[in-house]
Image (cartoon, rainbow, N blue to C red):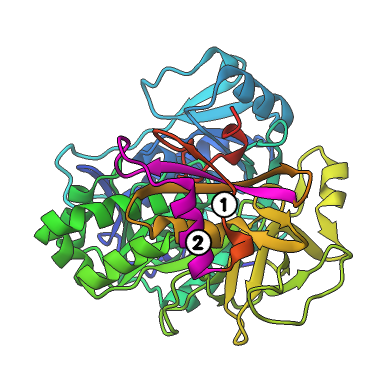
Amino acid sequence: MSSLFPALVGGSTDPARPALRFGERALDYGGLGVAAGRVTAQLAGAGRGRVAVWATPSLETAVAVVGGLLAGVPVVPLNPKSGGGELAHIVSDSAPDRILVAPGVELPDALAGLERLDVEVEVDAEADVNAEADVDVTGRPAERFAGEPDDDSAPALVVYTSGTTGPPKGAVIPRRAVAATLDAVADAWQWTGDDVLVHGLPLFHVHGLILGILGPLRRGGSVRHLGRFDTDGVARELTSGATMLFGVPTMYHRVAEALPSHPTLVKALSGARLLVSGSAALPLHDHARITTATGRPVLERYGMTETLMNTSVRADGEPRPGTVGVPLPGVDLRLVDESGAEITEHGPEAVGEIQVRGPNLFTEYLNRPDATAAAFDGGWFRTGDMAVLDADGYVRIVGRKATDLIKSGGYKIGAGEIENTLLEHPGVREAAVTGEPDADLGERIVAWVVPADPEAPPSLAELAAYVADRLAPHKRPRVVHYLAALPRNDMGKIMKRALGD
């Protein structure tokens, strides 16, 4: 297998070419080669044992992960916001003996048993991403990065799931999955080394780390991380050379809210080559507000920790809000019913579970052969996501099988389309939909609403009529609860299991 980072290892990239920037701290490819080379040297001679990375949004995290992958050592990113119990579980389960961390960062007691390796990154506080490299990197391909394994099934990362139904599980991501996903989305998004990506996503997850950091570096391009997402930062970067923006729906909602009073942001987004949203569904009204103001569509894609990326709306395809596009190159996708039979019909009533197969899949849940076996149907991974297919192959996700598929009155109803409809109501700021037991219907539809005006929320009758008129009577909510805010995780996903509390 060739290197995960041919632009860094192959020697053909100009060492002065910008690679990474976090705030005012930056590294070009020459500086990245030196810093990552130090990490590989630190990890050399210790076999292929796993190494943890304290994944703050920083240059040190990016360098640590790149250095670990170039050394052929499986990397375990740790969420700095995790509690002591969760960290202790992850460390016990993945058994790293070392942790890579930025100098001066204080680690929690749960990590006290790990050998600490400080990641040294030498940049000037006023670093210019266009400055000439001041290091000699001519010998880097052969001497510095000799640790990458030839086996494309070798583990690259162990990424832990959110643990909504129990302790987090470690998904073992092989090197082939990283390469296959990044090359597939490059094809779908026409992503090249000339692109400059801006994002403000956390670096302990697939979206922010694999797509947002490793993606640009595999292409030979560059990334500018905002540290903390804000619309002014987006406007600044997109008007100073950045071409792409990655975000989650919460971020794009803030963008949509800011556009009417932020002409600089409108101009910045209008000039972007590509806007991509993922990790959860982007509401249709935010799609419309952004496209109307800027002329630029937001492309949605669909992936998971276990599968990396599965589908996307293509840059050269039809923008279709409400869908996550078509399967990426190399990915097979099907819908199955409750008996496991493949669904061949199309349209809004032909709801089935998405199953995928391809080189983008994880290999196993670490130390969980039972969970690994249960996750697969032959060679197909059971995603747990429910969807319908348009006749031309576009995928419309309607929700999670466990929390978003509602069986009411003999119908299978996806919560997602009801949520999108509720969000179009002028009196609704945020909305979530769940089901609860009903003696007559089996389950009744429950709406959880954050009203635009808490003093005058829309009534249940008003919301029910609004949904019934736009979808179908059997999809109307039967109960409504009013909240000040919906519970969300770090990626902006609504935590529906917390709604009952």
Determine if residue 278 is in view: no
Q: Residue at x 79, y 44 (%)?
A: 439
Q: What stretch is highlighted in magenta?
A: 442-471
| Percent coordinates x, y for residue 450 in the rendering | 40, 41
Report the side of 359 relative to 104 (left or right).
Answer: right
Label 2's element?
helix
Q: State the residue lying farthest toward the bottom.
A: 392
| Amino acid identity at mark 2 | Val
**Residue at the front extreme of this rendering:** 461
Q: Callout 2: few (<14), some (14-19), or many (20+) C-alpha neighbours within 10 Å?
A: many
Residue 441 image point, x, y percent: 75, 52
User: In the rendered image, which quarter is residue 500 located in?
Assistant: top right
Seen from the viewer's position, the closer of residues 48 and 335 is 335
- Residue 234 in view: yes
- Residue placed most toward the observer, 248 or 408: 408
Q: Name the residue under label 2.
A: 467
Q: Are marks 1 and 2 in contact (CB under 8 Å)?
A: yes
Q: Give percent across and percent down for residue 156.
A: 63, 50
Q: Is residue 231 left or right of residue 227?
A: left
In which quadrant of the rendered image does the C terminus lie?
A: top right
Nearer the observer, 455 or 346: 455
Question: In the rendered structure, does residue 127 fall within the stretch colored magenta?
Answer: no
Is 123 on the left-hand or right-hand side of 398? left
Q: What residue type is labelled 1?
A: Pro
Considering only order in the chain, which callout, 2 or 1, is on the residue closer to the N terminus?
Answer: 2
Q: Residue 477 carries which label?
A: 1
Vertical order, 77 against 189 (above or below)? above
Q: Distance between the residues labelled 1 and 2?
A: 8 Å
- Reply yes or no: does residue 455 show up in magenta: yes
